[in-house]
Image (cartoon, grey):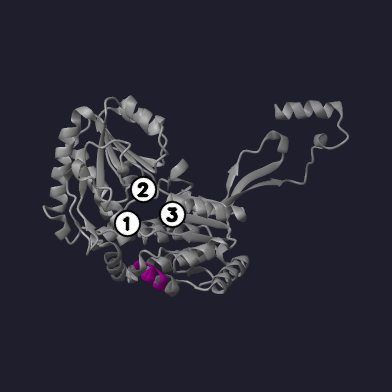
Amino acid sequence: MEAKEIQKIIDNQRTYFSSGQTLDLSVRQRALSRLKAGILRHEEAINEALKADLGKSAFEGYMCETGLTLSEISYMQRHLKRFAAGKTVYTPLAQFHSKSYKTPSPYGVVLIMSPWNYPVLLTLDPLADAIAAGNTVVLKPSAYSPHTSAILEKIIRECFDPRYVAVITGGRSENSCLLSQRFDYIFFTGSQAVGKEVMRKAAEHLTPVTLELGGKSPCLVDKSANLKLAAKRIVFGKYLNCGQTCVAPDYIYCHEAIKDALLAEIIRQIKKQYGENPLGNEEYGKIINEKHFHRLSSLIETNKLVHGGKTNPTSLQMEPTVLDRVSFEDAVMQEEIFGPILPVLTFSSIDEAIQKITAMPHPLALYIFTADKAVARKVISTCGFGGGCVNDTIIHLATSEMGFGGFGESGMGSYHGKEGFDTFSHYKSIVDKKTWIDLPMRYHPYREINRKLIRFFLK
């Protein structure tokens, strides 16, 4: 799309927002209803697009994308009136007689840039939050998932006037053009490298941002853990979407005493969940493109391979793979894996593990498997990370009752539910002062009695 077309879309949205039409809660509710209906109307086409782009089965597509998006929309519809209401707060005695309150207002024209790994969820979920908050939205889906981007564009065109919500497809030139424009808020999900560029561009206009990035999310397994259940849940979380999940367990960090037993259970679970021939399993996905496929293939060291490792360059498939005898200096531990490769490292004490993790960049997620509640509390309170689970993986992001977001190198800001509404809202602090009384102590000339009164009220 040409720069002039992009500029025109943004200008039209700014004019539309300035008209005040999105401030009406009934308009927001109808917009959410149209979005939900559009998703349901094109559910089969969404499944086909996700299959074409990522090899996702219809079951996984609904469980991890469409269903979660519909759930977020429904949550917003149920709670919108309460979220949008002003909140009265305590007024200090010095401001007698006044009413103090906070009221949310939309930022204005919002840019949402989404990634390819969960192209439906990570586009439409923040869209629902932004609409509920009363903004107009420009969506920029990833060029790496073209089939899904096409169906998203179709849904949005059917549901919305482009002055309200518009989709801009394309690649780097469109991204660059969008980031050079002035938006009132930018919401980005993707890699750390691109996130830094988004923040640099946003800084030129002093535009606030939410960055949902990634990182090497550890999965700690204590010697007290239920190894069978841990292995089952780790395999689910790691190999979901072929490992192309920002909150997937990036690596296992387990107690040295239980490593061999845990490895045996993980291999058993891989066979149980994906079969003896995962590459022949129609419900097992693929790597997004050749570039990522070759990057992942280069990380598999045959001398450390204990399971999997087979690939199909034609279909871009890679077996669920496990590596043992890995150190923090190995190539596979230098970057977020974002694929179906699971390195296993060991520690001799939980304090050693905590010390190592706290010395590393803050991950988006952390998982701890343990039967010892004190160990879980210690890890959670000491380590810095975005969010996580005790004795499970992934599921902390599947609720609208808790915000989801990164911390430090893994991002900033959060969304889902109330926190999603808040992310796309500016809260104005208002004091409504009554006119029937006007305390004189703040005005010149400052007399001694005024000083005493000020000290009385403000101590």
The Cα atoms of the two marked residues, 2 and 3, are separated by: 14 Å
| Camera-side mark, 2 or 1 | 1
Q: Position of residue 124 (x, y in %)?
A: 41, 61
Q: Position of residue 325 (x, y in %)?
A: 22, 36
Q: Residue flagged by tag 3: what amino acid is it?
A: Thr
**Which mark is drawn over residue 292?**
1
Q: Residue flagged by tag 2: what amino acid is it?
A: Leu
Is tag 2's residue or tag 1's residue first in the polypeptide sequence? 1
Judged left or right of residue 243, residue 445 is: right
The Cα atoms of the two marked residues, 2 and 1, are separated by: 25 Å
Q: Position of residue 265 (x, y in %)?
A: 15, 39
Is tag 2's residue or tag 3's residue first in the polypeptide sequence? 3
Is tag 3's residue or tag 1's residue first in the polypeptide sequence? 3
Judged left or right of residue 341, residue 406 is: right
Residue with the mark numbered 2: 397
* CB under 8 Å between discs 2 and 3: no
- Is residue 307 positioned above or below 27 on the image? above
